[in-house]
Image (cartoon, helix red, strand yellow):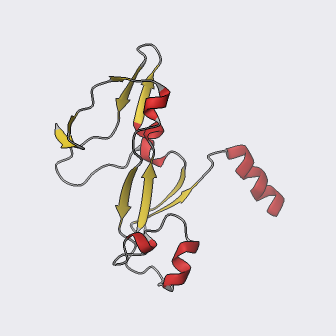
Amino acid sequence: SRVTGGRTYSNAPVKMDEKDLLLLPTVLIQMAAYDETPSHPEKDMEKFPGLTGNIDPSSPQDILLAIPATHYMEYSPSKGTYTPRIYFTESAGGVIGANAMQGHNVLFDWENQRVGIAESSCEYAEEAMTVTDDG
């Protein structure tokens, strides 16, 4: 186990109510931008949600993936507990799993070894109607 925020971290289930869940932090993961990403003027960086922009001026085109507690804490109704689904057990690198991808459209470009991520409502029917309406 690792120490985070002054406490020992584990993946053991925790008893809490939804109010306490919403007080937990949103985890931010910064992912390096593709080397050939077109450069944009600094003033335009705020037009692209999800980029680090002014948060990290040395890498303004990196992507920030936000994972709220409602995605990384899995609720068990039968036990009334929440289990953290962020693991610090990978020896090298990490895995971005389904919990992190919730609320996002994710495009895996295997041929070019890239991943594209955009925030999404995850409402398939709503998005399908938009595509149909636009032609």
The x and y percentages for residue 99 are 43, 41
The x and y percentages for residue 54 are 43, 74
Residue sitting nearer the eye, 20 or 32: 20
Does residue 110 appear in the picture of this structure? no
Residue sitting nearer the eye, 23 or 3: 23
Judge from the rendering whether residue 66 lies leftward or rightward of residue 56; answer left or right.
Answer: right
- The mark total stands at 0
When the figure is inspected, residue 38 is found, relative to residue 33, above or below; the finding is: below
> Which quarter of the rendering shows the N terminus?
top left
> Which quarter of the rendering shows the C terminus?
bottom right
At x 75%, y 58%, the residue is: 131
At x 36%, y 56%, the residue is: 29
Residue sitting nearer the eye, 42 or 6: 6
The image quarter containing residue 105 is bottom right
For the view shown, which residue lies furthest in the top direction? 78
Judge from the rendering whether residue 4 lies leftward or rightward of residue 83; answer left or right.
Answer: left
When the figure is inspected, residue 66 is found, relative to residue 113, above or below; the finding is: above
Does residue 109 appear in the picture of this structure? yes
The x and y percentages for residue 100 are 43, 46
The image quarter containing residue 112 is bottom left
The x and y percentages for residue 59 are 36, 75
At x 17%, y 41%, the residue is: 2
Judge from the rendering whether residue 46 lies leftward or rightward of residue 100; answer left or right.
Answer: right
